[in-house]
Amino acid sequence: MAEPMLSVYNINVWYGAIHAIKDISFNVNEGEIVALIGANGAGKSTTLKTVSGLLRSKTGSIKFMGEDITHTPADKLVGKGLAQVPEGRRAFLQMTVEENLEMGAYLRHDDFRQTMQQVYDLFPAVADKRRQNASELSGGQRQQVAVGRALMTQPKLLMLDEPTAGV
């Protein structure tokens, strides 16, 4: 049996005295879609932030593609193929749609125009606005830009935090 693409084992995260995540463990296999479901404040966003290196677990381990990434800084994980789209329609508002997508390709050393076209094909509403600043887009269009920017990294694993909120 193949090793999971992502393996999260026994992580615990605190915000000060608040124990936000308690002994969470799960696996994600290649090609699998996994959803974290729970009430507001249940720890879904905290879990994703911990996996993506923005927060640290006091216990346990996180493995991605067989490599222990428990203490790997967030900026190094994108290059390893792990991308997260945080909640909140995060686009660079003073940049055009195209510039936002180019930011997603900042680590790439190849011609990324084909990937950009794939993003435009996936999200035709923003393709038509590629020269407009993200500040001029609707909330749903900004979310499409945020997802598109993550797709520009050509991730092996894409984590979406509340992708339809406000859409």
Image (spheres, rainbow, N blue to C red):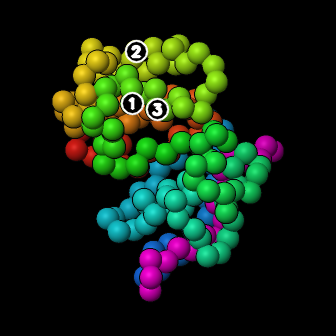
Q: CA distance from mark 3 to mark 2?
A: 18 Å
Tell me the crowding category of disc 3: few under 14, some 14 to 19, or many 20 or more residues within 10 angstroms, Cα based: some
Q: Secondary structure at mark 2?
A: helix
Query: What amino acid type is highlighted by mark number 3?
Result: Met
Residue on which disc 2 sits: 121
Residue 129 image offset from top left, x and y in percent = 26, 18
Q: Quadrant of residue 106?
A: top right
Q: Residue 32 in magenta?
A: no
Residue at the bottom extreme? 17
Q: CA distance from mark 1 to mark 3?
A: 5 Å
Residue on which disc 3 sits: 103
Q: Secondary structure at mark 1?
A: helix
Marked residue nearer the N-terminal end (3 or 2): 3
Q: CA distance from mark 1 to mark 2?
A: 16 Å
Instruction: Magenta stretch: give its range.
Output: 1-17
Mark in front: 1 vs 2? 1
Query: What amino acid type is highlighted by mark number 1?
Result: Asn
For the point 41% across and 34% down, the residue is 147
Tell me the crowding category of disc 1: few under 14, some 14 to 19, or many 20 or more residues within 10 angstroms, Cα based: many
Decide which of 28, 154 is in the foreground and name it: 154
In the image, residue 114 above or below residue 8? above
27 with respect to 21 (left or right): right
Whether tag 1 and tag 3 are in contact, CB under 8 A, the answer is yes
For the point 38% across and 62% down, the residue is 38
Q: Secondary structure at mark 3?
A: helix
In the image, residue 138 above or below residue 26? above
Residue 88 image offset from top left, x and y in percent = 30, 48
Residue on which disc 1 sits: 100
